[in-house]
Amino acid sequence: MAGPEAGAEAARARALAVLRIRGAALGVALVPAAVAVVLLVGGLTGRIGRADPVTSSGGWDTARWAVTGIALVVLLLAALVTAVVVRARPALSPSVPIAESSAPDLYRLVRDLADRLEVPAPSAIALTPDCDSWLEDRTHRAHAPPRGRAARGGGGAGARDGARAEQAPVLVIGSPFMWWMRVAELRALLAPVVAGTGPSANPDIAAARRFVRGLDAAVAVSARAKSPLTAPAPAFVGWVARLLLRACREHALEMERCVAAAASERAQSVDYGLRIVAQEQVGLAYAGWDRLLTRVALPAWRMGRWPSRLDAGVVSALTELSRRDRLAEGFASRLGERPACDLLEEPGAVDRAASLLAARLFHGGPAEPGPDWSPVGWQQYPEEVVDRKWRQEAARLHRVLDALPPEPAEGAQPARPPAAPERPARPECRIPRPAPQSPEGQTPAPGERSADPGPESSGPTLTRVIERLTADERAGDLVAARLGAELAREERAEAERQAAREPVADGPDTGVPGVPGLPGVTWGDGLADGLPLFPMQPPRTGRELLADHVTAMVCCAAVDTAGAAPGLDWLDGPVLLVDGVRRSDLGHPVLRLVDDGDAGPLGDWLGEVGVRPEKPVRLV
């Protein structure tokens, strides 16, 4: 036997091995009960313990009742483990369910693909904010729709249970694929995934998968137990479940490998050449999606805003990548073909739901929009996210400076080390400017300008920041430490506010109130605590925080005094535009100031752009 049938048979053999482990565990649990039954029946019939009533009866009675007691305890424990394994809700991937009425063309494409592969069609389709696609078994009763909704759909409980037992798995598609890939590429990419419904329909493979997923869910249930009074029972259940998982781990892994090999072999006859091109698009989409989340979406999430068109942003990011990279030029020529998102009736609403789910997964934001968690469009992103982010960080930096102890009186500023004589007067890094206008619009008197403002200018000015960081060698470390403490305090306050909100019930088809046209979202498991399942970036160091805040202060000064503007780069996130052109040369001067206390390069940059560092900036 060769081809997909061989892989399916190998997978079935591994599934039977998993089921034998389940049977062996059940047999071990029934051994004490069997021994107790033998002893009890033997005592009743007089065949055990009745040969010499004077010497044997008492010992056999003690053994009989001791074994019976042990058997009852083992049966109770086995019943407890079985009940938890059967009733525990398996892990559910967070996704946006797509009803057939909202994507008839997509369902038609998947069913035609299943017919060509001669396998059952998936029972439903869902989108997830990830660059991957898979089949997911959602036949567990905890994943079923609510009773009222099922009743409105018609059919009694028996009909629903029967349909659930024969239901095919759900096809989960990465939402970036729907916007970046063309229809033909998506069909070629989904071919080996849809082909996996064939082995999944095998009763032995399905039973083995249910058993493994039940054990995994039981381990999760035991890990979530917090009450000290009921802790022993969940601990015992978790220990048994982990023991069984270790016993069947190798067989389960090989079963899944064989299923994947059989599905891939069956899909060889469907768009094989186009599938190679589609796999290249997978890598490109993953790179664009990762860059979009970390550079563009993350700053907005930290500001309490969530971009509502992330999937559409992937197309813009990858188009920008193809413009910069000659190797990707061929990818942009595909944009003239029909995109896969055209298979959706309302792609905007689906994109909005997937974007909110991505914010929930990767940042741990609230599950519903609100006053402090509102959507933002790409057109409003520069003004509502970039500019506000800069001014918020500049305000935080000045709050930290306000809390620092005052500097010594004038004349106490330390001199630069002799190793750097080429910049003897750091305090004069301020760019000479004409006499500035006061906030009331009047020119200060010459006497006011000639007075030395001291080592640290008052007010939210860039000059104040520069003078503080060049005051001594330890100034940068002190400001960085205070910034880290201030940011940690704000994050704790935000976490407390989020924990005070009503938790979201994890389950299927949880709608998003207050957002018309937004389809239901399956939040999955592990999201009720408000923590991100996949943190985007590790915590920033103190120096990185200081560099980011100084950069924000420089950008605010450039916007307020030099006519610059905030902008959005699809691959790099927030950028500063001067005369409509991106300035990407600010990082080095800021690092020289933060790391070395050298304000010379930054002063040269400010003079070139025309920034007036002595002017106060507008803060949030």
Image (cartoon, rainbow, N blue to C red):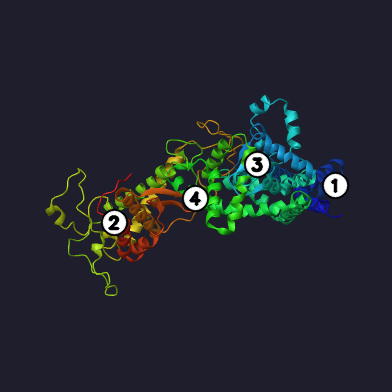
Q: Earlier in the sequence, mark 1 or mark 2?
A: 1
Instruction: Assign a secondary structure to mark 4.
Output: loop
For mark 3, give the secondary structure: loop
- Residue 68 falls left or right of residue 375: right
Question: Which residue has dot 3 on it?
Answer: 88
Q: What kind of element bears circle 1?
A: loop
As drawn, the label of residue 376 is none
- Check disc 3 and give the amino acid type: Ala
Q: How far apart in space, not on screen, are marks 1 and 2 (Cα)? A: 94 Å
**Cα–Cα span, label 4 and label 2:** 30 Å
Quarter placement of the C terminus: top left
Quadrant of the rendered image containing residue 65: top right
Residue tagged 1: 48
Q: Amino acid at mark 2?
A: Val
How crowded pointer 2 is (Cα within 10 Å; few <14, some 14-19, many 20+) is rated as: many
Q: Which mark is drawn over residue 465?
A: 2
Q: Is residue 583 left or right of residue 191?
A: left
Say which residue label 4 marks: 570
| Residue 123, position as x, y percentages in the image | 71, 37
Q: Earlier in the sequence, mark 3 or mark 4?
A: 3
Of all residues shown, which one is farthest toward the bottom? 419
Q: Nearer the viewer, residue 206 or 462?
A: 462
